Amino acid sequence: MKLNRLQRSAVIAFAGLIVASTAVLVLAHRSARPDTGVYTVGDVQVMHASVTLSGREVRGHARLADGDRLLTGPDGRARLRLDDATLVFVAASTDFTLRGSGITLSQGRLFVQGDAASRTEVTIGAATTAVSSSAAAFEVGVGSNRNPVNKIYCAQGELLVSAGGRQARIRRFYRRRPSTTGPEG
C-alpha cells in the first residue's frame, strides 16, 4: 500500500502531535510536584508590638521555621513555645537566631525554661549550654559599649556551660560571665 503525498503529510503531522502531547504531559507532571515543606520548630506569640521574624513584622502569633531570626524592638516582647516543650521569654531589644534545637543570642535577654523532655542549646558568644529540666536567663551585651559582658543565670536546676574546650557547672541562683576562652569569668 502506497501513500500519496497528502496521506504521508497527515501521518507525519499525527506522529508530531503525539510526541508534542507526550512532552506537554511530562512537563505538566513535573511542575505539578508539591513544593518542598518548611521545617518548623515552634510558635511565637507577640506580647508587645515591634517583633520581626526573618524581616517580616509579626502581630499575634506565627510559626517559627528553622533558621528564623527574631528581633524585638525597644518595646517589643515575645513568648516562644518550641516543639520540644521549651518556653522562651524574649525581652525588649533582643536579637537571636533559631537553628535546629538551638538558639544563638546575639543581643539582649532571654529566659529559657525547659522540662525533662526539652533539650534546647543556647549559645552566647563562645559559650553554649543545654537547657533541660532547668530554667535560665541569658544576657548579651550588658554593660558599656566598650566592655560588653555576657551573663548566664541559673534560676532552677543546673546548667553545664561549655566554652573554649572547658566546662563549668552553674547551679541554681548562681551567675556566670562566660569569657571567650572558657566558661569561668
Image (cartoon, rainbow, N blue to C red):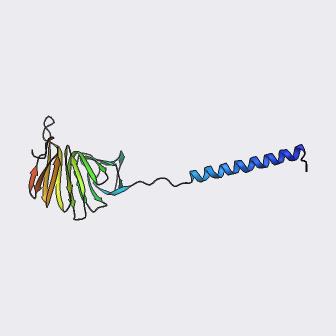
Q: Give me the residue at 57% from left, 51% from top.
A: 31
Q: From what the image shows, is residue 144 above or below residue 92?
A: above
Q: Which residue extends farthest front?
A: 1
Q: Give me the residue at 49% from left, 53% from top.
A: 35
- Image location (x, y in percent) of residue 115: 22, 64
- Image location (x, y in percent) of residue 140: 18, 45
In the image, 77 versus 96, the foreground residue is 96
The answer, for residue 154, to whether it is visible in the render is: yes
Q: Which residue extends farthest top?
A: 146
- Image location (x, y in percent) of residue 29: 60, 53
Q: Quadrant of residue 64?
A: bottom left
Residue 36 shown left or right of residue 166 in the figure: right
Q: Give me the residue at 70% from left, 51% from top.
A: 21
- Image location (x, y in percent) of residue 22: 68, 51
Residue 17 shown left or right of residue 162 in the figure: right
Q: From what the image shows, is residue 40 above or below residue 12?
A: below
